[in-house]
């Protein structure tokens, strides 16, 4: 499950992105997220992973919405996964809580625009697929 915690700055949607340090996808940019635990809902996973990786606590009344799913094939690693992208709209107070809680797995987090994301390289395969399969309008509509 990958998350898209979003907030608006000067009428622009911002996404939280980090540079991966783990073996899988090393050196590429990706969104916070991780594996679904047994019995966990997508939303529960999203809240947990976002907090574990970034320290951000999304209020329970803030919904996580399904955005897209990608079918990821990593041929070199003989690995196949599905990524569920979720979106949560947060305010600047929550956005400012960001810290790097797993410095062995991520170089650091930053808020960027969709336009900046599209120009970023390299991006982790699931995120690359999201960018190629969906437009900013498809993902965020009138936010």
Image (spheres, rainbow, N blue to C red):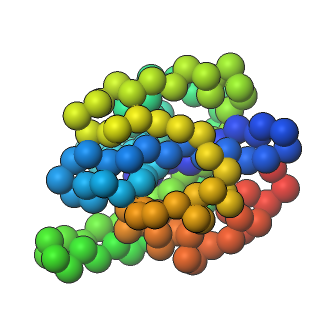
Is 46 on the left-hand or right-hand side of 142?
Answer: left
Camera-nearest residue between 82 and 108: 108
- The residue shown at (73%, 47%) is 13
Using the rendered image of the protein, determine whether residue 51 is visible from the camera's viewpoint.
Answer: no
Residue 33: quarter of image: top left
Q: Residue at x 61, y 22 (%)?
A: 96
Name the quadrant containing residue 119. bottom right
Residue 40, x across and y down, in percent: 36, 41
Q: How many marks?
A: 0
Residue at 73 percent of width and 57 percent of height: 140
Q: Give the camera-side residue of 120 and 54.
A: 120
Determine whether, in the image, residue 7 is placed left or right of residue 100.
right
When asked about the image quadrant of residue 126, the answer is bottom left
User: Picture coordinates of residue 58 (x, y %)?
Assistant: 57, 27
Q: Nearer the viewer, residue 77 or 39?
A: 77
Horizontal relation, residue 23 to residue 32: left or right: left
Indicate the position of residue 100 as horizontal and vertical percent values.
39, 27
On screen, residue 10 versus residue 90, left or right, reads right
Residue 63: x and y, percent? 64, 39
Is residue 95 visible to us here? yes
Tell me which residue sits at (50%, 46%) in the image: 17
């Amino acid at each position: 499950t990958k998350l898209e915690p979003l907030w608006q700055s000067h009428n622009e949607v911002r996404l939280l992105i980090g540079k991966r340090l783990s073996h899988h996808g090393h050196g590429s940019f990706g969104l916070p997220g991780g594996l679904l635990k047994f019995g966990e809902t997508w939303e529960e996973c999203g809240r947990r992973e976002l907090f574990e990786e970034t320290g951000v606590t999304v209020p329970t009344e803030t919904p996580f919405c399904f955005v897209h799913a990608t079918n990821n094939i990593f041929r070199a690693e003989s690995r196949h996964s599905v990524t569920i992208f979720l979106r949560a709209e947060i305010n600047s107070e929550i956005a400012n809580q960001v810290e790097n809680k797993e410095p062995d797995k991520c170089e650091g987090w930053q808020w960027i625009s969709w336009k900046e994301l599209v120009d970023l390289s390299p991006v982790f395969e699931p995120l690359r697929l999201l960018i190629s399969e969906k437009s900013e309008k498809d993902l965020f509509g009138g936010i």
